[in-house]
């Protein structure tokens, strides 16, 4: 019984809900101890494939699965025929319409759940008693979810028009989005992929990708800290750069000029100018500056100026926030505070 209790307090029930208590509150708006027979059977039926059987995904499929559980209960003589007939005749009634409107921001909520479990442990979280206050802005999150769907749909259409239709075994295109207050670091909205039920992998916090030209402002920021100005002239841009593999001249479709100011180089996103600036400032200094901005581990190579390192979208968003916050870096935060209730009310800082 203890093993079963631990399992039911941790297992995923779909729709971003972990544990029987959370699933009961999420789907039915009541505590698990208050569930009736058909409601309890529905939750039991979700465990095999929560992403497929969740009533918010497919209500008919969830009810069919529930009835299967009830039939097995009857065959096992856990319930009698009268209880079985009454249960299968009961329609599935979810929490009111507000419940359906809350089916948003699942990547954000999952990241909050992960952080809470990491900080307090499974048992503390799923036994209840914690009240979590997040930085989520519901309106911003709904807009972010909608924009992600719209943008990916538009890209899919362009691929079809370009005769690059996706094959049956190809993975669908994914995306990520982070909206953060640069002054406080509070994350207002976060999207980690196309569809949480299809893939819960969070591409905003877990995926590490090359930032490309988005890394260039960090090189120029390091240069300004070293005494350069937006009017500083970068020269000999067509001269090759020596690397371990020989001479290298970065490809540059933005400009062919042999010299330009830092301001102009940043405006046109010149590859050659960024690499030259990196050489002048020094790769170690640029690496140090990038680490100060929290973008993670980056390589000590000339191509660093073109974003050859790997970073998360969340860390890049926070780093760019420093530009909007007068050079001050705010660490991204999804949780304002956690309260626990007992004889006294305490605030637990993360």
Image (spheres, grey):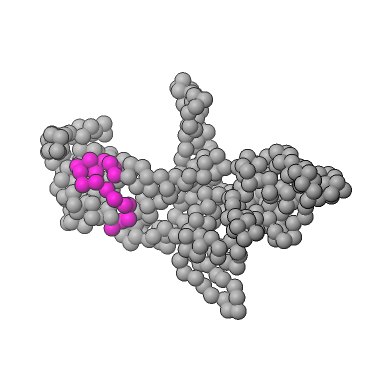
Q: Is residue 299 magenta?
A: yes
Q: Is residue 170 magenta?
A: no
Q: Residue furthest top?
A: 163
Q: Relative to residue 36, is residue 207 depicted above or below?
A: above
Position of residue 125 measured from the top left corner of the image (x, y, whole percent) = 56, 62
* Residue at image location 45% in from the left, 49% down from the top: 178
For the question of whether residue 141 can be seen, the reply is no
* Residue at image location 69% in from the left, 49% down from the top: 43
Quarter occupied by residue 291: bottom left
Image quadrant in which the N terminus is located: bottom right
Position of residue 220 measured from the top left corner of the image (x, y, whole percent) = 24, 49
Position of residue 242 measured from the top left corner of the image (x, y, whole percent) = 12, 38
* Residue at image location 13% in from the left, 34% down from the top: 246
Q: Residue furthest right?
A: 82
Left or right, 9 with respect to 176, comes to: right
Position of residue 247 measured from the top left corner of the image (x, y, whole percent) = 13, 34
Front in this rendered view, residue 155 or 133: 133
Left or right, 322 with respect to 265, comes to: right
Majority SS type along the magenta span: loop
Q: Residue furthest bottom?
A: 343
Left or right, 204 with respect to 231, comes to: right
Quarter occupied by residue 268: top left
* Residue at image location 24% in from the left, 46% down from the top: 299
Left or right, 219 with respect to 329, comes to: left
For the question of whether residue 137 can be seen, the reply is yes
Magenta range is 292-309
Number of numbered tags placed on the structure image: 0
Front in this rendered view, residue 117 or 74: 74
């Amino acid at each position: 019984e203890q093993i079963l209790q631990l399992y039911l307090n941790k297992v995923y029930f779909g729709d971003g809900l972990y544990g029987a208590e959370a699933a009961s509150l999420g789907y039915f708006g009541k505590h698990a101890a208050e569930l009736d027979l058909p409601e309890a059977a529905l939750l039991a039926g979700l465990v095999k494939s929560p992403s497929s059987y969740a009533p918010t995904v497919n209500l008919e499929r969830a009810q069919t699965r529930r009835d299967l559980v009830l039939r097995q209960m009857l065959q096992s003589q856990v319930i009698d025929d009268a209880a079985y007939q009454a249960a299968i005749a009961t329609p599935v009634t979810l929490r009111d319409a507000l419940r359906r409107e809350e089916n948003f921001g699942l990547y954000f909520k999952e990241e909050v759940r992960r952080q809470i479990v990491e900080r307090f442990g499974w048992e503390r979280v799923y036994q209840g008693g914690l009240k979590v206050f997040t930085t989520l802005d519901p309106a911003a999150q709904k807009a972010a979810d909608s924009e992600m769907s719209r943008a990916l749909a538009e890209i899919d259409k362009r691929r079809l028009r370009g005769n690059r239709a996706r094959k049956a075994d190809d993975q669908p295109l994914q995306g990520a989005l982070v909206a953060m207050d640069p002054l406080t670091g509070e994350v207002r909205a976060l999207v980690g992929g196309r569809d949480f039920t299809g893939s819960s992998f969070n591409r905003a916090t877990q995926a590490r990708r090359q930032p490309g030209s988005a890394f260039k402002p960090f090189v120029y920021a390091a240069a300004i800290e070293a005494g350069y100005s937006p009017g500083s002239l970068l020269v000999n841009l067509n001269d090759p750069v020596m690397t371990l593999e020989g001479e290298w001249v970065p490809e540059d479709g933005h400009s062919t000029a042999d010299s330009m100011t830092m301001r102009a180089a940043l405006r046109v996103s010149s590859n050659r100018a960024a690499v030259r600036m990196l050489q002048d400032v020094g790769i170690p200094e640029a690496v140090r500056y990038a680490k100060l901005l929290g973008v993670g581990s980056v390589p000590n190579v000339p191509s660093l100026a073109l974003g050859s390192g790997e970073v998360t979208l969340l860390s890049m968003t926070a780093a760019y926030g420093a530009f909007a916050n007068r050079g001050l870096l705010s660490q991204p935060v999804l949780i304002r505070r956690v309260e626990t209730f007992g004889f006294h009310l305490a605030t637990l800082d993360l």
